[in-house]
Structures are given as structure tokens and as C-alpha cells.
Amino acid sequence: MRISVLFLILFLPFILVGKDKLPKSIYEFKVKDRFGKTINFSKFKGKKILIVNAPAMNVNSAQYAELETFYQKHKDNLIIVAFLMEDFAKLPNGPIDLDNLDKRNYHVSFYLTGLAEVKGDGPNLNPVYKWLTHAKYNHLKDSDVQWDFQKYLLNEKGELKGVFHSTISVSSPEFMEVYEK
């Protein structure tokens, strides 16, 4: 019994730390795009990164078009990565059929990930979103994903500089003030 207690006291902190280990930098993440190819964030060094959670099924949302216009205007210094998700979907007829996710036309040229969980803090939460939503990782603030098209803006050094609710447009003064810094 004493040996078991001593073992727990000595090694439990190492077990817990190892279990919750996330990269220190956004540049250490890799995710799969909607076609299964790797998106390597290390390739984005020196550019601003805008991470957005986007509905997988609502492909005609005006916010997709707005993000594409913004991306086209700023793509020399900006990367947009939209995490496709359905965390806010209403499912009256059962699960959404996402079998043809790679065949949908989103009418955008920025990165789209495969389906990801971005809301909450459960075991299936995408690691990038765990990093983005917890101050102990992102060194800015804790946040919760409230709705589709919530925006996380990182500067050219990979530092989180702003979190914007879905109602905040990328062309709004509030967003542009942070973007232009």
C-alpha cells in the first residue's frame, strides 16, 4: 500500500502533464484538410493567420463570400484556415450526411479542414481549438466558441491577438484595428 501511494505521489504529476500536452506554438500543429491532405501550420510563419469555425453544411453562407473577398485582398500577408464543423447544427432528422464533404463547393480558395469539433472541452475537441480557447496555451485569454464563424486572429509571430464573435465582420473597424497592428 505504501509503495502504491508513494508511486502516485511521485509520478502522478508527470502522467497528468503528459496527458494534457499541447504544442507551445501554433506553428507546431498539423491538421487534415477536407481532402485528407496535411495542412502544416509551420509553413505559415511570417503571415497573419485567421482561424474560423465554419459550418460544413451551410455552404452558401454570406460569411464564406466575405472571408473569400478579405482573403483575396490580403493573401500576400494572410492565411485563412476554416475548420469545417457542425457543432451548432439542429438535427431533427438524425445525423448529417457528410460522406460527400470533399465534393461540396464552398466557393473559397483558402484552407478548409475536415470536419472538426470546436466547441466545448470534451475529449474530441480539436487540439488547435483547445490551444485557441485556453489562455494557458494561447497566452491571451480563455474563450468559448459561441457560434459559426467565430474568428481567431494571430499575428505574423503566431501570437493570438484577437477573438471575434461571429457577428463581427472581417471588414469591421473592430476587427481591422487588431488586424492592422
Image (cartoon, rainbow, N blue to C red):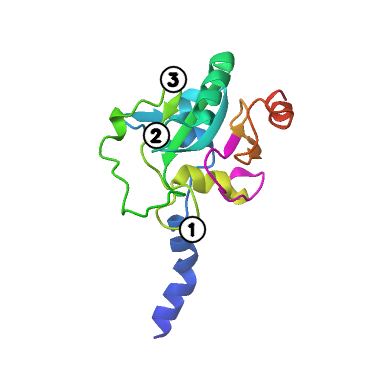
- All told, the count of numbered labels is 3
Instruction: Please tell me whether mark 1 sits on a helix, a strand or a loop.
Output: helix
Q: Residue furthest front?
A: 92
Question: Split into 4 quadrants, where in the image is the C terminus?
Answer: top right
Disc sitting over residue 113 in the figure: 2
Q: Could you tell me residue 133's position as x and y percent?
A: 57, 48
Numbered circle sitting on residue 71: none
Identify the residue under disc 3.
109
Per the image, the residue denoted by label 1 is: 17
Q: Is residue 161 left or right of residue 9?
A: right
The answer to which of marks 1 and 3 sits earlier in the sequence is 1
Against 80, residue 123 (above or below) is below
Judge whether 120 appears above or below 149 on screen: below
Could you classify mark 2 by the number of other residues whose Cα lies within 10 Å: few (under 14), some (14-19), or many (20 or more)?
A: many
Q: Amino acid at mark 3?
A: Ser
Which secondary structure dominates the residues rendered in magenta? Answer: loop
Residue interval drawn in magenta: 138-152
The residue at 58%/37% (across/down) is 151
Taking the image as shown, residue 80 lies to the left or right of residue 33, namely right
Query: Could you tell me residue 111's position as x and y percent?
Result: 43, 26
In the rendered structure, are the residues bearing label 1 and label 2 in contact, judged by CB atoms less than 8 Å apart?
Answer: no
Q: Residues within 10 Å of mark 1 (few under 14, many from 20)?
A: few
Q: Residue furthest bottom?
A: 1
Image quadrant in which you'd find residue 178 = top right
Label 1 with label 3: CB-CB less than 8 Å = no
SS for dot 2: loop
Q: Amino acid at mark 1?
A: Val
Which mark's residue is nearer the viewer, 1 or 3? 3
Q: Amino acid at mark 2?
A: Thr
Contact (Cβ within 8 Å) of mark 2 with mark 3 = no
